[in-house]
Amino acid sequence: MARSQIESDNQLPWQRPQPGESVELLNQARDLIDDALKLYQDHESRFITEITDPHNARYTLAEAVNNAGHDLLYNLPTQPDPLWNPAPGTARTRILCPPERAATSVTRSTGTEIRVADHPGINLAVVDGHTALIYTPGNGYKLLVVRHPAVVNLLTILLNHIWRTAEPLSRHTATIAARRECPTTHQILRQLAVGSTDDAAARRLSMSVRTFRRHVADIMRDVDARSRFQAGIRLAQLGLVPSRDDLQDDDLAS
């Protein structure tokens, strides 16, 4: 089943996911991970190996990459981690990348296919549809190697669904580049940066409030944001939000 799911990936057209769809799916993945942990606690340890030593974890991850036969699918967290650094092997290597990391060096690896999706930070990889690697950083550091068929199969289906609805990196990059060159985008972001109300911003830009809000919604969509606050964070990470020094007196005027 996992194999046919992967094979069908190339046959389906890319389409932008509904807001929050990827997040909901990976929240389901979290539930599956919790189920895997419960299996471990219930003495089903033949299906799960828990590794708490960073050196052994790094070796296990590298071995999984090198031994992958046909498909390696990573889900990257929002914050980089030196251990969880995808490297292409001989198998097809795919990376699901959050928008926050779309411009980082990890997305420039050769031999990988990369798509951008809004999702919670889970360090998760599925190898050939039969092994899942789940990494928990921090003080409670651990790497779980899950081989329970039902859990791995469902994780594979979820990640492949997110992959099919995620935005190819090249398209995402082109969209952001277009935003950088768009005068209207710059004008709108200047108004948002100084906290203008929609009515005031629309008046200053000589457009209707409805048109202003449509532009804002388009910008939010392009950076995969579900709120203006989230959009502001991502736009700042992309260097699209003007600094206060760049703002002029008329921008700051009430």
Image: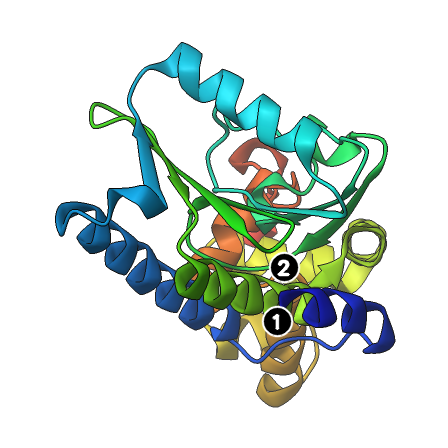
Image position of 84 (left or right of 186)? left
Q: Amino acid at mark 1?
A: His
The quadrant the C terminus occupies is: bottom left
Q: Secondary structure at mark 1?
A: helix
Q: Amino acid at mark 2?
A: Val
Q: Position of residue 89 (x, y in %)?
A: 76, 30
The residue tagged 2 is 223
Image position of 103 (left or right of 234)? right
Residue at image position (69%, 71%) is: 5
Residue 130 seen anywhere in this rendered image of the structure: yes
Q: Position of residue 181 (x, y in %)?
A: 85, 51
CB atoms at circles 2 and 1 under 8 Å apart? no
Q: Quick one: 39 or 6, which is closer to the camera?
A: 39
Mark 2 vs 1, N-terminal side: 1
Against 170, residue 35 (above or below) is below
The residue tagged 1 is 161
Residue at image position (59%, 63%) is: 224
Against 149, residue 238 (above or below) is above
Q: Find the residue positioned furthest to the front.
A: 46
Q: Position of residue 126 (x, y in %)?
A: 56, 49
Image position of 112 (left or right of 120)? right
Q: Secondary structure at mark 2?
A: loop
Residue 93 sits in quarter? top right
Residue 227 seen anywhere in this rendered image of the structure: no
Q: Position of residue 165 (x, y in %)?
A: 67, 72
